[in-house]
Amino acid sequence: MTALRWFLIAVAALGAFAACDGGDQTFAAEAIDYLKQVKPILSQRCASCHGALKQEAELRLDAGSLIHQGGHSGPAVVPGKSAESPLIQAIQGSDGVTQMPLEGTPLSADEIQLLKMWVDQGAITPKEDIPPSPRDHWAFRPVVRPAVPPPATDSTSSHPLDRFLAASQQARGLTPLRAAPPEVLLRRVYLDLIGLPPTADELRAFLADPSDAAYERIVDQLLASPRHGERWGRHWMDVWRYSDWAGYNQEIRNSQRHIWRWRDWIIESVNADKGYDRMIVEMLAGDELAPTDPDVLRATGYVARNWYKFNRNVWLDSLVEHTGKGFLGLTFNCARCHDHRYDPIEQVNYYQFRAFFEPHQVRTDRVPGQSDLLQDGLPRAYDAEAATPTYLFVRGDETQPDKEHPLAPGLPTVLAPDPLPIEPVVLPAEGYYPGLRDFVRQETHAQAVADVEKQRVAWNQAVAVRATAQGEVDKLAGAGQVAAAPAVTAAAGGETP
């Protein structure tokens, strides 16, 4: 190898070493930005146990002032001394301290190094607002009716909704657009209320009289139209996850056969202007509210729709998740394995909520005029085993139920501070034994009578055929063509034909 080549290799090696050494010095000297580099790590890895929602050891790590304030063990950091800082000891699992976080993967070496450098540089934090408790969110506060604002201008409508809109626009310095042309207004209200545009004749009629009185008459007509329930029923069917049954051939694996009866109940309820609160009660407890009323029992198709053939826990998980989302706007499913990270829902709350549904099963009842449940029927929910216990699954694992601590039905404290009064409901016999219903007994009796009559006719026909055959045999015997046959005795009445 030439001297020149050795020289170039030496220069390259020295350059690389200098670059590496200089890089480390630059990294070490770089000021760590709390908001950009430290806070994201603490928010992602620590705040679920040491944040606004939950404070293990009374320690919060979601604001700089709270980090310095610390918890049971004093300040979480000792500025300039990372080795003496409880926070660093915890994330490293050093000095006899249990490594944090308890769940999930430990912090990476780079994340730990960054936090140590931040502490060694003085653990500098800017002034910042302390995050409020999620329990104080407006969604968890009781609804209070606000005072109706005064008219913003002389032209403001007297309707309370218009006054609220006008006050909000005025506060923001906004000016409403001019009134929509009659043809645009008519199209909007048609699409909004029934999902269909007006016909040419309807448009011409309104253009001939675009008065407020005429507009109100049209609104009333559209609200009274069956199309109104179909248009807005689709919205609620999306929220409540309506779907036809799924399976293989005639095998049902998800939802229920004839679940369309729940769909019709939704549409009819919207058209009947049934209250939203009443709809919720009928869907969740129609079997207890009106156990013998098939029109109400259709509503429990909401519960039956979640049925899943292969795993009851999947079935109940789905019911808990979508009842929380559809009626409460809360993701209960996030608390199936651990406490919710953002909402005030503990893991135990998830299973207390599940306990409301634990006893239920799904069946298909007969409907008048059809005894074949494959052809038609009423899918509905009912409480099969009221004493069925609910257990918390450790880390959400259904193979690890905590059978030492059965759970009663309940809600998170933020929704129901006091225990819920759970009382038994006495059902009529027809409610839990549908074969006792009048139409079932009458149709079953009528069918039995018809079957008996059918068999009687068949028997009489058979007797007549045998009598005819016996007569032919006797004739042939008299003519000497066959040997005489013994008389055939009819089973009915012991008479000979």
Image (cartoon, grey):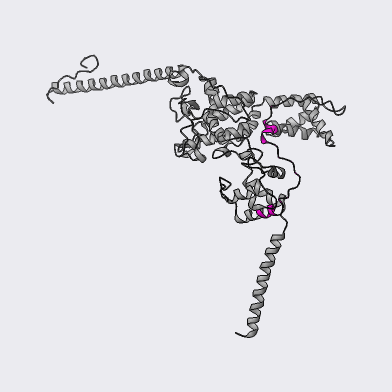
Residue projecting furthest to the bottom? 2
- Answer left or right for 13 relative to 152: left
| Residue drawn at x 73%, y 26% as measured from the top left | 219
Q: Which residue is drawn at 55% across and 31% down?
A: 353
| Spot occupied by residue 321 in the image (x, y as percentages of width and height) | 57, 36
Task: Please give the count of numbered marks on the rendered protein.
Answer: 0
Q: Can residue 55 be seen in this view?
A: no
- Span colored in magenta: 116-142
198 or 338: nearer the viewer: 338
Q: Position of residue 204 (x, y in %)?
A: 77, 31
Q: In which quarter of the image is the C terminus?
A: top left
Task: Tell me if residue 422 is in the magenta stretch.
Answer: no
Above or below, 29 against 476 in this view is below
Residue 10 position (above or below residue 431): below
> For this rendering, which residue is in front, 461 or 360?
360
Describe residue 398's horizontal placement relative to residue 50 as left or right.
left
Q: Does the magenta stretch include residue 139?
A: yes
* Residue, far right: 154
Q: Nearer the viewer, residue 252 or 81?
A: 81
Find residue 315 and report its horizontal and vertical position in percent.
Answer: 50, 35
22 displayed left or right of 385: right
Instruction: Tell me where residue 442 sits by quadrant.
Output: top left
Report if residue 363 is visible in the image. Answer: yes
Quarter that holds the N terminus? bottom right
As rendered, which of 280 and 472 lies closer to the eye?
280
Residue 420 lies, in percent from the top left, at 57, 24
Q: In this view, does 191 lie above or below 429?
A: below
